[in-house]
Image: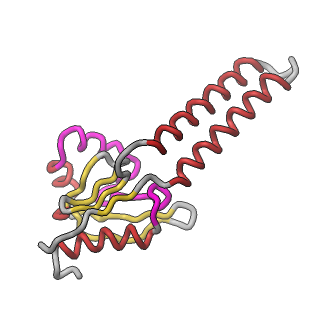
Amino acid sequence: MRDHPVQEFRIGQSKVRHGLVVAGLGMVVGAATLFFADDSVADRDWIGGLLLAFGLAIGVHAWRTGRRPGAHMRVDADGVYFREWGATVPWDEIADVYQSGSRLQPFVTLRVRDPTRLLGVLPEDASRKLRRNRLWKPPELRIPYSAVEATREEILAAIQGGLAARNPSVA
């Protein structure tokens, strides 16, 4: 196998920004409901308080997610790690990588050779998390474009470079 450099990608700031916008909207609507809705609005205090708490929780989650140390995605000699999968997918298990999805929800997709074998190769906790993951649709693992701070071309090039380094006949 040829050497393949480690490539790390940070979390996409647009993902964090979207979370903070949703949080802000929730808190503004909650505060407006609490302070400006009159008594004709049933359960004004309960609904306003719930929206405020919901917005605050989303804001804290988005802020903490954006500040996590380490790579959100890593391509190295071991394979492809993506934090939202909770696992590193070994190169031997990856058959192909390509773009998929729609304009509104584009993905970089890894097609796995054998989904059952992949789940058996991963540590038990990673396998369990991956089975429940919304980005796992056997035999495909998806990476949303907005999840990492890189262009789709950079993500594809990194993974295709790793596949080519692992199997020169693919290049």
State which quarter of the image contains the C terminus. Answer: bottom left
Q: Is residue 171 left or right of residue 109?
A: left
- Residue pictured at 87% horizontal, 21% vertical: 38
Could you say which quadrant of the image residue 44 lies in? top right
Residue 115 to residue 124: above or below: below
Residue 43 to residue 74: above or below: above
- Residue 124 included in the magenta stretch of the image: yes
- Residue 6 included in the magenta stretch of the image: no
- Residue pictured at 61% horizontal, 42% vertical: 20
Could you say which quadrant of the image residue 92 lies in? bottom left
Give the colouring mode of the picture: secondary structure
Q: Is residue 128 left or right of residue 107?
A: left
Q: Is residue 1 left or right of residue 82?
A: left
Residue 148: percent from left, percent from top: 44, 57
Residue 77: percent from left, percent from top: 19, 62
Residue 110: percent from left, percent from top: 32, 64
Q: Is residue 63 left or right of residue 100?
A: right
Residue 157: percent from left, percent from top: 35, 73
State which quarter of the image contains the N terminus. Answer: bottom left
- Residue pictured at 35% horizontal, 52% vertical: 71
Q: Which residues are magenta?
A: 122-150
